[in-house]
Image: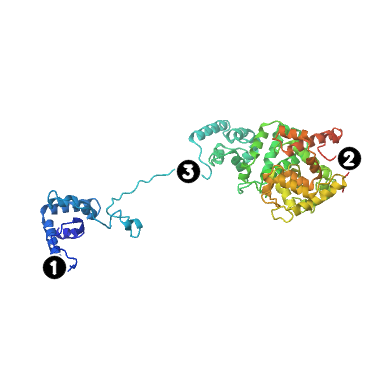
Amino acid sequence: MESSMGIEMGLLDLDLLQLPDLPSSPSPSSSSTSPKHSLSHARLDDLFAQWLSLPDTQRLVMSLLEEAKSAGSSPVAQVSSNVSVSLLPGVFKEGSTPPLSPKSSPLSPRSPMRRSGSGPTNLSSPLRKSSDPLREVIPQFYFPDGPPASREMASQCLARIDQIFAGHPDGLPASAFMTITKEICKLPSFFSGILFKNVDVNGTGLVKRERFIEYWVDQNMLIADTATRVFTVLKQPDKNYLTQEDFRPILRELLATHRGLEFLHDTPEFQERYAETVIYRIFFYVNKAGNGQLQLREIKRSNLIAALQQVDEEEDINKVLRYFSYEHFYVIYCKFWELDSDHDFLIDKDDLLRYGNHALTYRIVERIFSQIPRKFSSKAEGKMGYEDFVWFILSEEDKSSEPSLEYWFKCVDLDCDGVITPNEMQFFYEEQLHRMECMAQEPVLFEDIVCQMADMICPHKEGQLTLRDLKRCKLSGNFFNILFNLNKFVAFETRDPFLIRQEREDPSLTEWDRFAHTEYIRLSMEEDGEDASNGSAEVWDESFEAPF
């Protein structure tokens, strides 16, 4: 025990005891080896040995050591923190001044060494009682497929599924699947066929309860938004996008079930053309990338879901102006048929030049057939197919839409550098100026046109028009009309106050909506044998001959 105590006592810092020195007469010239200094150290050693030999001191030190060992910590700090308080009162006389704290200590929290971080820090110090911290379980907060449905929602849905399947123990047939489509899946009714086919993978003609729960509930579709549901049902299992073919099943069912399209049942060829036109219009407005691959994010940013829901609820198909209006299809198809002189369902340059009573210039038609704005889907060289014409007419008659602005920007940007310069504008306007002179109209100088367009669009950089500049301006469509559409240029210069008032009364209608409505009336009157000019939407008088 004595050796153990000796070892532990060796850890005591004698400076912490601050014992008083024996009286001496210090001399500045004295050194550490002087007799007086040696005598002082000897006297201190005697006092310290006498203090350690006291029974009370030994018991106190041993008790401190035992407590330090039992607490799992080193006795160094325990002893050094209690020496001046617990051990010294028995040695010093009453009334003596208590010792000051040490001037510096390597373990002091205020040590400059600690603050500067120059010395190592013992994180596993035995002076500190170690204990494992409590581990807090963080609940899952990110769900790639969306958060799971609540128990209440899931139980209500399963109860309703049980009711629907109760009368069909062998499985639901396709004729009884409409309730599942509308109530459980919250999809338009004309999605019933494609949904049934997706669930009935084996083609048995029946869908069992367990199979439907596996397809819909287990895939966490209960809490998915409508766009995700539509996208999931329409897309192919191995694809993460939609193609034009993916929309054909729902359009076939729409044509077969919608009351507003019953009159087409006897003309299957027009049913096919109607379905194609709807698909082309959807991809024109929704597929911003223009790559024929419709992404989920594009659907969410569009009005396609609202149009699908509206066409399912509205009996009059012509009131659904977005994508599905039969009147709009009729106008597009008749316009194409009028230009297709040989009725081979292809249009060449000469055919397109007759569009709008020769409203377009040769140079812009050349750019269109160079396939700069869009590659033709037609396989015939130098010919435009029906899909290409749909893109053209939607771009031509509604230059306020983003796809239309992108279409014509590519046409005018001759060097494809993303900037339209005055030289490029002059290239197209030269033909317009010549046409005005042939029509005996007062020509508008190009310099005046440049100033007018700069004031109208306010480009970010003077003398350079970017696509962003055009998208920011509400009158950007007039910029292109001035360059290559003479009829609309003249109409812009002589605006009819009555038409302006009509536009302000119903701002929800687009330029395409107004054009299609006017053209449908004209075409209907032509079929009834009335004078077409009374309902014509063309600004250029029909009596005028084309200058070229």
Can you see residue 249? yes
Secondary structure state at the residue bearing disc 1: helix
Rendering coords of residue 447 (x, y %): 77, 50
Q: Nearer the N terminus, badge 1 or badge 3?
A: 1
Residue 152: mark: none
Name the foreground residue: 328 vs 163: 328
Residue that carries the numbered disc 1 in the rendered image: 35
Amino acid type of disc 2? Ser
Give the left or right position of residue 34, taking residue 502 as reference.
left
Q: Quadrant of residue 341?
A: top right
| Number of other residues with Cα within 10 Å of mark 2, as a class: few under 14, some 14 to 19, many 20 or more | few
Q: Nearer the N terminus, badge 1 or badge 2?
A: 1
Q: Nearer the N terminus, badge 3 or badge 2?
A: 3
Between disc 1 and disc 2, the foreground one is 1
Rendering coords of residue 371 (x, y %): 75, 53
Between disc 3 and disc 2, the foreground one is 2
Secondary structure state at the residue bearing disc 2: loop
Can you see residue 333? no
Rendering coords of residue 483 (x, y %): 78, 48
Residue that carries the numbered disc 3 in the rendered image: 141
Give the left or right position of residue 20, taking residue 169 as reference.
left
Name the foreground residue: 334 vs 83: 83
The answer for how far apart the CA atoms under marks 1 and 3 are is 78 Å
Residue that carries the numbered disc 2 in the rendered image: 543
Amino acid type of disc 1? Pro
Amino acid type of disc 3? Phe
| Number of other residues with Cα within 10 Å of mark 1, as a class: few under 14, some 14 to 19, many 20 or more | few
The answer for how far apart the CA atoms under marks 1 and 2 are is 136 Å
The answer for how far apart the CA atoms under marks 3 and 2 are is 70 Å
Name the foreground residue: 15 vs 288: 15
